[in-house]
Amino acid sequence: MRDPEPKRAFLSIELLLDPSTEAAVRGEWDALAADGMSSLGHHTSASNRPHVTLVARTDLAAIDAHALVERPAFAVTLSAPLLFGAGERRVLARSIVPTAELLDLHADVHAAAGPGDDAPHTTPGEWTPHVTLARRIRVDDLERALGHVGGEIHGRAVGLRLWDPTTTSVTDLGMFR
């Protein structure tokens, strides 16, 4: 029997949300957790916060983050829930309505990062912007879980950070103007 391939760690550049939007997402995390379901609310690390992943790779060269954050904060809308994956357990997330500002930022982050081994869910042309609510929600719990996901959340995109899972650390890349 062959040993399974080690799980690859993906560094990521993440879009941060304003405090009231974060609080609304954390409220949904908490409601799922209180009802005994999978939820990112169970993950209590200080690095755990609602975000939108813009790029995820096993290696990210140094980028000019200053150029990326030299833009105004912009509106974001967290919309309908969606599922990723297959099988009995799935990822439950909130979709993000794509806007010109969001798509421009995504393109600019990828241009600044240069070519690389993008995780498929962040590759330009295949990216589905979202905020994760639960990573291993049981399909059998989905109807109950959706009762904890409210209507649209209107907020602001306010900055960027780098997540490094190998060191479990975040680096603030800056806030938008």
Image (cartoon, rainbow, N blue to C red):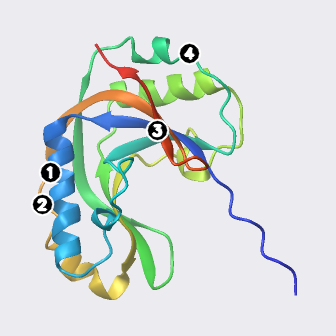
Given the image, on which type of amino acid does mark 2 rest?
Gly
Amino acid at the residue labelled 3: Val
Callout 1 secondary element: helix
Q: Is residue 80 above or below residue 36?
A: above
Mark 4 vs mark 3: in front = 3
Q: Residue at x 32, y 18 (%)?
A: 176
Residue 165 or residue 158, whichever sits in front: 165
- Residue at image x 44%, y 80%? 89
Q: Residue at x 17, y 75 (%)?
A: 34
- The reply to whether callout 1 and callout 3 are in contact (CB within 8 Å) is no
Viewport quadrant of the N terminus: bottom right
- Tell me the residue that label 2 is attached to: 150
User: What secondary structure is marked by label 4?
Assistant: loop
Mark closest to the chain's N terminus, 2 or 4: 4
Q: Of the residues shown, which amino acid type is indicated by label 1?
A: Ala
Residue annotated with mark 4: 64
Judge whether residue 126 can be spotted in this image. Answer: no
Residue under pointer 1: 24
Would you say the residues marked 2 and 3 are in contact, meaning their CB atoms lie under 8 Å apart? no
Disc 4 crowd rating (10 Å Cα; few below 14, some 14-19, many 20+) is few
Gap in Å between the C-alphas at discs 4 and 3?
17 Å
Residue 109 x, y percent position in the rendering: 52, 26
Cα–Cα span, label 2 and label 3:
29 Å
Residue 115 position in % (x across, y down): 71, 31
Q: Is residue 79 above or below residue 136?
A: above
Q: Earlier in the sequence, mark 4 or mark 3?
A: 4
